[in-house]
Amino acid sequence: MVRRYLRAGNLAVTAVLAAAFLAGEAAIASGWLSPYYQVQLFSVGINVILAVSLNLINGFTGQFSLGHAGFMAVGAYTAAVATTRWGLPFAAAILLAALAAALMGLLVGVPTLRLRGDYLAIATLGFGEILRSVLYNVDYVGGATGLLGIPRLTTWPWLFAMTLLTVLLVKNLVNSSRGLALKAVREDEIAAEDSGVDTTRTKVLAFVIGAVFAGIGGALYAHYFFVIQPTTFSFLKSFEILVYVVLGGLGSVTGSVVSAAALTLLSAALQGLAALRMVLYGLVLVLLMIFRTGGLFGTWELSFEAMGQAWGRLLRRPGAGGDLSGPAALPRAEAATLPDLPEVTPDGASQDR
C-alpha cells in the first residue's frame, strides 16, 4: 500500500502541486503579483471549481443542467450569512454552504432528473430563476441590494485547497466503479438501466455532488469579492460556466480546468469590450459545434501515461531526416545492416542479385 502511494508519478505530481502552491503564496505575500492579477488568479480558481463540478453533471453523466448558478448562489448566501450574521468561522461557513447546496441539489434533482434533455435544461433553468426571484424579495439577505461588507476570508491556501479537492475528488469519482455507472447513463440510459444501473439514483448523486462544489465555489466567491447580489447569479452565469465545460470537452476534467482558466483570463483582457463578451462566448460555441463538437480536449485527460503515449507516437512518426535514435528508427537501422537476400522467381527458383 505504501509503495503504491510512493510511486514516481505520485511523487512528481505532489512535487509539482507543492511548487505551485509555494510559488503562488510567495508571489502574493511579496507583492510581486499586483492586486489586479490576484483578482484574476482567484477568479480562475473559482471558475475551475464551477466548471469541473458542472462537467460531472453535463459531461460525465450526460444531463443538461442550466441551474449551476443557482447552487452557487445557495452556497454564497449561506456562507455570507454564516460569517456576517451568525459569526461562524470561515471553515464552518464553507461546510454549511456545501450542505445547503447539497440539500438544494437533492430537492431539485429528485423530481426533475426523471426528465431528459431539453426538458431537464428548462427545469433547472427555472430553478435558478425562481431562486433569484426569492433572493430579490427576502430582506434578511439584503433583497435586491444584496449582502454588503462580507469579510475577505478567501485566501490563497483556501482557494488552492478547495480547487485541488474538487479536481481530485471528481477525477477519482469518474475513474471509480461509480464513475462507470455515470458514463453508462451518459452513453445509453435505457441500456444502463437494463444492465442493473439505478439511473435515477446515479443522476441524483452526480447532481448533488456537482451542487456541493458549486456551493463551495459560491462561498469562496462571496468571501473574496465582498458583495453578492441576485444579479450575480443570473442565467448568464450558468451560461458562462456551461461554455467552460463545452469548450474544454464534455467528459474531460483537464479540458474544464484549461478552458475555465483560459476564458477567465480572456474575459479579463476584454474588459473594455464587456458588452461583447457574451457575444464572443456565443461565437466560440457556434464555432465549436461546427468544427469540434466534442470540445477542444474531447474526453482526453492529462496523465503521465497519456503523455508517455503521446511522446511515443511522436517518436514513431516518420519524418524527413527522422531521428535515428528513436524507436521508430530502429527497424530502418536494422534493415540497413541486413545482407542482400536472393530474389525468388515465380517458379520457386532462387536467383542471386
Image (spheres, rainbow, N blue to C red):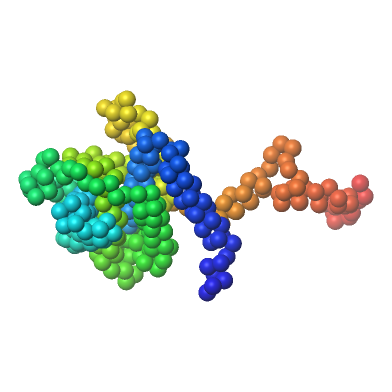
Count of labels in the image? 0
Q: Residue at x 86, y 52 (%)?
A: 338
Tell me if I can see residue 257 in this picture. Answer: yes
Quarter where residue 350 is shown: bottom right
* Residue 352 falls left or right of residue 296: right
Residue 302, position as x, y percentages in the image: 50, 52
Nearest the eye: 232 or 141: 141
Tell me if I can see residue 290 in this picture. Answer: no
Among all residues in the image, which is located at the extreme right?
Answer: 352
Among all residues in the image, which is located at the extreme bottom?
Answer: 1
Residue 32, position as x, y percentages in the image: 46, 38
Residue 40, position as x, y percentages in the image: 37, 38
* Residue 208 falls left or right of residue 330: left
Nearest the eye: 141 or 212: 141
Q: Residue at x 69, y 39 (%)?
A: 319
Among all residues in the image, which is located at the extreme top?
Answer: 272
* Residue 27 falls left or right of residue 235: right
Classify 278 as above or below 14.
above
Quarter where residue 31 is shown: top left
Residue 264, position as x, y percentages in the image: 36, 38
Q: Residue at x 73, y 43 (%)?
A: 323
Classify 274 as above or below 210.
above
Classify 130 as above or below 6.
above
Nearest the eye: 122 or 40: 40
